[in-house]
Amino acid sequence: MDEKTGEIKGKAKELKGELKGKTKKLEGEVKGKTKEIEGKVKGKISSKK
């Protein structure tokens, strides 16, 4: 019983870690794309002046 519980807890922790990693990666990608778009918009605005 204890061995199974330990295994399940271990897998749950592993999955949580993977999810956190994927979430952070996606957040980073989104932030990067947002900055890229902001830069392009600012560039267009300043070139119109």
Image (cartoon, grey):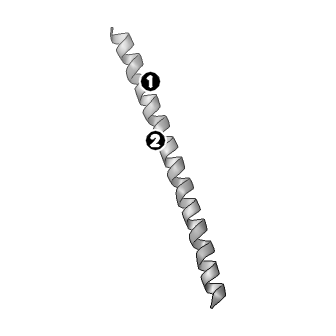
Image side of residue 23 versus residue 48, left or right: left
In front here: 38 or 7?
Answer: 38
Which residue is found at the position 40% from the left and 19% from the top? 8
Residue 21: percent from the left, percent from the top? 50, 42
> Is residue 26 positioned above or below 37 on the image?
above
- Which amino acid does the dot numbered 1 rest on? Lys
Q: Position of residue 15 (x, y in %)?
A: 46, 31
Residue at 44% over, 24% down:
11
For residue 20, the mark is 2
The quadrant of the rendering that contains the N terminus is top left
Please give the residue where the numbered disc 1 appears in the rendered image: 11
Residue situated furthest right in the rendering: 47
Left or right placement of residue 3 versus residue 34 in this view: left
The residue drawn where x is 53% and y is 49% is 26
Residue 44: give x, y in percent of width and height.
64, 80
For marks 2 and 1, the one nearer the N-term is 1
* Cα distance in 3D space between marks 2 and 1: 14 Å
SS state under label 2: helix
3 and 21: which is toward the camera: 21
Q: Residues within 10 Å of mark 1 (few under 14, many from 20)?
A: few
Q: Where on the picture, by quarter, is residue 34?
A: bottom right
For the residues bearing labels 2 and 1, Cβ distance under 8 angstroms: no
Residue found at x 49% / y 48%: 24
Count residues near mark 2 (Cα–Cα under 10 Å), then give few for <14, some for 14-19, many for 20+.
Answer: few
